[in-house]
Image: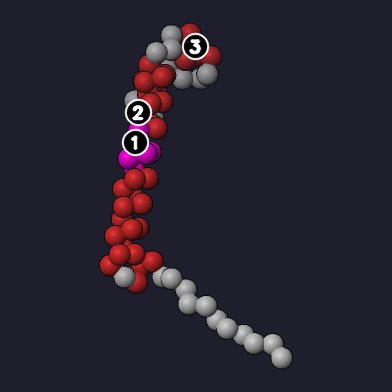
Amino acid sequence: MAVFEPTLLNHAGSSFGGRLSIAVQRAVAAVTAWNDARSTRIALSKLTDRELADIGLTRADIDAI
């Protein structure tokens, strides 16, 4: 005879701890994205105008990243 036992799902958003965890994860993701963009801008700023043109960018494009 087969027995079916449903497991309880942990809904992270249903408790204060879960909501806090989600908020922290989002904050970490935002800081990570900001740092990645900052690193990219720094690296692109070190390229010459010729190198930027080779990849289809100008100095003005760097700030948009």
Spot occupied by residue 17 in the image (x, y as percentages of width and height): 30, 65
30 in relation to 58, above or below: below
Residue 13: percent from the left, percent from the top? 36, 67
* Kind of element beneath mark 3: helix
The label nearer to you, 2 versus 3, is 2
Quadrant of the rendered image containing residue 45: top left
Image position of 43 (left or right of 51)? left
**Quarter in which the C terminus is drawn:** top left
Disc 2, SS: helix
Is 39 positioned to the left or the right of 8 in the image?
A: left
Dot 2 or dot 3, earlier in sequence: 2
- Position of residue 15 measured from the top left corner of the image (x, y, whole percent): 31, 70
Q: Secondary structure at mark 1?
A: helix
Residue on which the image places disc 3:
51
Q: Residues within 10 Å of mark 1 (few under 14, many from 20)?
A: few
Image vertical order of residue 55 relative to residue 50, above or below? below
The residue wearing badge 2 is: 38
Which residue is disc 1 drawn over? Answer: 34
Residue shown at 35%/33% (left/top)?
A: 35
- As shown in the figure, which amino acid type bears the numbered disc 3? Glu
- Looking at the image, which is closer to me, 28 or 54? 28
Q: Magenta region: which residues?
A: 30-35
